Image (tube, helix red, strand yellow):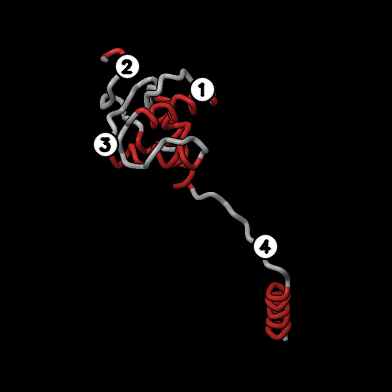
């Protein structure tokens, strides 16, 4: 008899759970939290004044990001020409950065192109130019 009552209660509980609206709970995984901490630490070590060396593909990404934010960088051709530099300068000015027209780490970070930023030791500094 106890087994029958226990089974019936368990079955009713399962049925009630199946009929109730499901609510998803999003809990960030431990690995996601570690990635966030790692990105924050990398940004802290990053020299925002450094100007990384960008290839044509990276310049294209910057031109695309500028275009998406409403700044006319000219043709998206991977060439850091006068129109792209003017767009970078306008972007920097609008967002309160030093408006140099150079694609430095601060500009890349503000554009959302963090993966293009130079790593410590692998970047060229404005003072070297």
Q: Earlier in the sequence, mark 4 or mark 1?
A: 4
Q: Residue furthest top?
A: 127
User: Please, is residue 45 above or below residue 9 in the view?
Assistant: above
Whole-number angstrom distance, CA of label 3 to CA of label 2: 18 Å
Q: Earlier in the sequence, mark 3 or mark 2?
A: 3
- Mark 4 or 1, closer to the camera: 1
Residue in the foreground of this view, choosing between 122 and 35: 122
Tell me the crowding category of disc 4: few under 14, some 14 to 19, or many 20 or more residues within 10 angstroms, Cα based: few
- The numbered mark at residue 93 is 1
Residue at image coords 73%, 79%: 12
Q: Which residue is mark 2?
A: 126
Whole-number angstrom distance, CA of label 1 to CA of label 2: 18 Å
Q: Which residue is mark 4?
A: 23
Dot 2: what SS?
helix
Dot 1: what SS?
helix
Tell me the crowding category of disc 3: few under 14, some 14 to 19, or many 20 or more residues within 10 angstroms, Cα based: few
Tell me the crowding category of disc 1: few under 14, some 14 to 19, or many 20 or more residues within 10 angstroms, Cα based: some
Q: Which residue is mark 3?
A: 55
Q: Earlier in the sequence, mark 4 or mark 2?
A: 4
Q: Circles 1 and 2: CB distance less than 8 Å?
A: no
Whole-number angstrom distance, CA of label 4 to CA of label 1: 45 Å
Quadrant position of the C terminus in the picture: top left
Q: Earlier in the sequence, mark 1 or mark 2?
A: 1
User: Please, is residue 67 above or below residue 48 in the view?
Assistant: below
Residue in the foreground of this view, choosing between 10 and 57: 57
- Mark 4 or 2, closer to the camera: 2
């Amino acid at each position: 008899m106890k087994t029958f009552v226990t089974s019936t209660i368990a079955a009713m509980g399962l049925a009630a759970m199946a009929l109730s609206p499901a609510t998803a709970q999003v809990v960030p995984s431990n690995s996601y939290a570690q990635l966030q901490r790692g990105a924050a630490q990398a940004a802290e070590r990053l020299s925002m004044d450094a100007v990384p060396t960008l290839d044509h593909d990276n310049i294209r990404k910057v031109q695309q990001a500028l275009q998406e934010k409403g700044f006319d960088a000219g043709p998206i051709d991977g060439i850091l020409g006068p129109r792209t530099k003017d767009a970078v300068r306008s972007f920097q000015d609008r967002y309160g950065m030093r408006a140099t027209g150079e694609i430095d780490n601060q500009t890349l970070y503000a554009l959302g192109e963090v993966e293009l930023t130079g790593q410590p030791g692998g970047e060229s500094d404005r003072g070297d130019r």
